[in-house]
Amino acid sequence: MSKEIVKRVKTTDIELKDKLVAVNRVTKVTKGGRHFSFAAIVVVGNEKGVIGYGLGKANEVSDAISKGIEDAKRNLVKVPVFKSTVPHEQNGKFGGSRVFLKPASAGTGVIAGGAMRAVLESVGVKDVLAKSKGSSNPHNVVKATLDALMKMRDPISVARQRGITVDKVFNG
């Protein structure tokens, strides 16, 4: 996200759906025995181009999930979705995770694994071909997928930047 403008979204009057991506049990060994706590990564979205992710940590799973949902609602961004798919091919990376998103024709479905699937379904993409390379750590895959989505540009902004009509963007 260097030198890029991130489009923040206000949470008022948006109906968000949350999806649990992963829950991690963390053990701290003390003199009195083992102490368990939980970390949950959650993705929220309205299935119309608004998405956010959050991390919640607590001693109970349900508390960790609710903290993750609150964190995700504070970090919402707007990404372009064009005809129920992504506008163009894009790579994203975060840490050791690398992802590749490619538009697909209508009826293809979401061809993606675990963490990527949760992000793409929450943002409202219904047809996409996706590949995850490198690390499969759910935290990094979610962040890499969001990196790829935030790099996307919708056809209207491309046409405006080039000074041409939207039809010429597609037909050359």
Image (cartoon, helix red, strand yellow):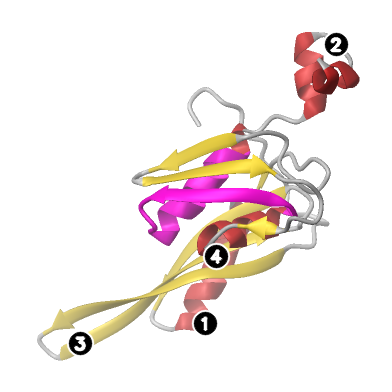
Q: Tell me how far mark 3 sits from mark 2, CA to CA.
A: 64 Å
Q: Earlier in the sequence, mark 4 or mark 1?
A: 4
The amino acid marked with disc number 3 is Arg
Q: Tell me how far mark 4 sits from mark 1, CA to CA.
A: 12 Å
Query: Which of labels 2 and 4 is toward the front?
Result: 2
Q: Earlier in the sequence, mark 2 or mark 4?
A: 4
Residue 127 part of the magenta segment: yes
Query: Which of labels 4 and 3 is toward the front?
Result: 4
The amino acid marked with disc number 2 is Ile
Q: Earlier in the sequence, mark 4 or mark 3?
A: 3
On the image, the x and y values in percent for residue 35 come to: 25, 84
- Label ID, residue 34: 3
As drawn, is 113 to the left or to the right of 105? left
Helix, strand or loop under label 3: strand
Helix, strand or loop under label 4: strand
- Label ID, residue 164: 2
On the image, the x and y values in percent for residue 65 come to: 53, 74
Give the class, few, some or many, for how many residues have Cα within 10 Å of label 4's Cα (few <14, many ≥20).
many
Q: Earlier in the sequence, mark 2 or mark 1?
A: 1
The amino acid marked with disc number 4 is Val
On the image, the x and y values in percent for residue 72 come to: 58, 58
Residue range (magenta): 124-149
- Label ID, residue 62: 1
Q: Tell me how far mark 1 sits from mark 3, CA to CA.
A: 20 Å
Query: Which of labels 4 and 1 is toward the front?
Result: 4
Query: Which of labels 3 and 2 is toward the front?
Result: 2
Q: Earlier in the sequence, mark 1 or mark 3?
A: 3
Q: Would you say the residues marked 4 and 1 are in contact, meaning their CB atoms lie under 8 Å apart?
A: no
The amino acid marked with disc number 1 is Ser
Tell me the residue at 74%/47% (across/down): 49
Q: To which residue does mark 4 refer?
A: 42
